[in-house]
């Protein structure tokens, strides 16, 4: 039996399953049940302009507003502005391939992750997020025959520990986002990684779309979402909002990512489960224009309204 403390919650792992104490995810729902956020198309030059741009979109969560080259003064100023305006900084993206088969590239990626985690910790973001990476030498996030193997699992554990141990964050978490062809590729492999990495500052970045890898899961994705929140809820630090569609004019399964509202993801269940957690952002991503983000936000807010959830 393995017991870990996460945000004041003792989580017990027994026989591969994390058991969360009753009521751990069901605190009082505050003014904003879910904090919706997304990229900003309006340019900003200082924290005040950044907050104005967020307020114009009614976002209560934001991507990190500064890059790795930001000064300590800038980081402190944006952190203070977010706190004053009741904005949660959701995540610092560390997008890179820490397990690249090219050792020079993997070393550079690990260094990027370390610096990104430092930024997340300093600015008070909920998490620093990356994918685990890929053994594909040509596509940093692509499929490869060696990705889903015990050896690569162990390599992911090693590199993730190295990143967390180099920073020892006190205010944030390092998280891995699921990919269809890289660990974690399921709720169960998320659980296995949490236990194997065994670092209290390792968390989950949940993107349900990335876990929909077959027609069977596609048509029952509501069950997938419920299972994810049941088993991973206390570890979730941020979520992504998009949608997925199974095209019916293809002979083999083709599951393209689409704008929220144009696919089959069960947003009613997604929002109901997320609303049980406190201050975990839902971040829009991968759209091509401000208008597309507006439409996605309107759809998600409409589903929230139908279920008495404010975003």
Image: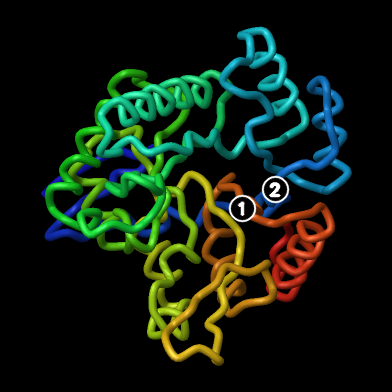
Earlier-in-chain disc, 2 versus 1:
2
The reply to whether the C-beta atoms of the residues labelled 2 and 1 are less than 8 Å apart is: yes
For image coordinates 56% across by 26% down, the residue present is: 124
Judging by the rendered image, the residue that carries numbered circle 2 is: 37
Q: As drawn, is 180 to the left or to the right of 193?
A: right
Near mark 1 (Cα within 10 A), the count class, few <14, some 14-19 or many ≥20, is many
Residue extending furthest front? Answer: 138
In this rendered view, identify the residue nearer to me: 203 or 309. 203
Image quarter for residue 80? top right
x then y, percent, for residue 72: 61, 9
x then y, percent, for residue 49: 86, 27
Near mark 2 (Cα within 10 A), the count class, few <14, some 14-19 or many ≥20, is many
How far apart are the two marked residues, 2 and 1, measured between alpha carbons? Answer: 6 Å
- Please say if 218 is above or below 61: below
Image quarter for residue 133? top left
Q: As drawn, is 278 to the left or to the right of 302?
A: left
Colouring mode (rainbow / by chain / secondary structure / one colour): rainbow
In this rendered view, identify the residue nearer to me: 72 or 305. 72
Judging by the rendered image, the residue that carries numbered circle 1 is: 282
x then y, percent, for residue 83: 69, 27
For image coordinates 77% across by 31% down, the residue present is: 85
Q: Secondary structure at mark 2?
A: strand
Q: As drawn, is 305 to the left or to the right of 159?
A: right
In this rendered view, identify the residue nearer to me: 231 or 299. 299
x then y, percent, for residue 206: 46, 55
For image coordinates 58% across by 59% down, the residue present is: 275
The quarter of the image holding the C terminus is bottom right
For image coordinates 32% across by 55% down, the residue present is: 182
């Amino acid at each position: 039996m393995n017991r870990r403390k996460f945000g004041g919650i003792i989580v017990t792992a027994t026989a591969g399953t994390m058991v969360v104490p009753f009521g751990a995810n069901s605190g009082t729902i505050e003014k904003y049940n879910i904090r919706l956020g997304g990229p900003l198309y309006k340019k900003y030059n200082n924290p005040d302009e950044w907050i104005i741009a967020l307020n114009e979109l009614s976002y209560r969560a934001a991507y990190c507003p500064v890059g790795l080259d930001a000064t300590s003064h800038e980081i402190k100023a944006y952190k203070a502005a977010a706190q004053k305006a009741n904005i949660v900084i959701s995540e610092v993206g560390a997008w890179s391939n820490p397990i690249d088969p090219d050792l020079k590239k993997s070393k550079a990626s690990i260094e990027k992750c370390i610096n990104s985690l430092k930024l997340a910790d300093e600015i008070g973001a909920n998490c620093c997020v990356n994918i685990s990476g890929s053994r594909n030498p040509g596509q940093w996030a692509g499929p490869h025959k060696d990705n889903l193997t015990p050896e690569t699992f162990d390599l992911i554990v090693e590199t993730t520990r190295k990143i967390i141990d180099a920073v020892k964050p006190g205010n944030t978490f390092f998280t891995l986002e699921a990919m269809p062809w890289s660990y974690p590729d399921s709720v169960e492999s998320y659980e296995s990684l949490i236990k194997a990495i065994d670092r209290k500052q390792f968390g989950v970045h949940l993107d349900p779309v990335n876990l929909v890898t077959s027609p069977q899961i596609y048509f029952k994705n509501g069950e997938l979402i419920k299972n994810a929140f049941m088993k991973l809820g206390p570890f979730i630090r941020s979520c992504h909002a998009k949608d997925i569609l199974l095209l019916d004019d293809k002979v083999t399964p083709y599951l393209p990512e689409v704008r929220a509202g144009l696919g089959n993801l069960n947003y009613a269940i997604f929002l109901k489960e997320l609303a049980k957690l406190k201050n975990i952002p839902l971040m829009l991503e991968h759209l091509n224009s401000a208008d597309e983000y507006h439409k996605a936000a309107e759809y998600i807010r409409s589903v929230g309204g139908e279920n008495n959830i404010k975003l």
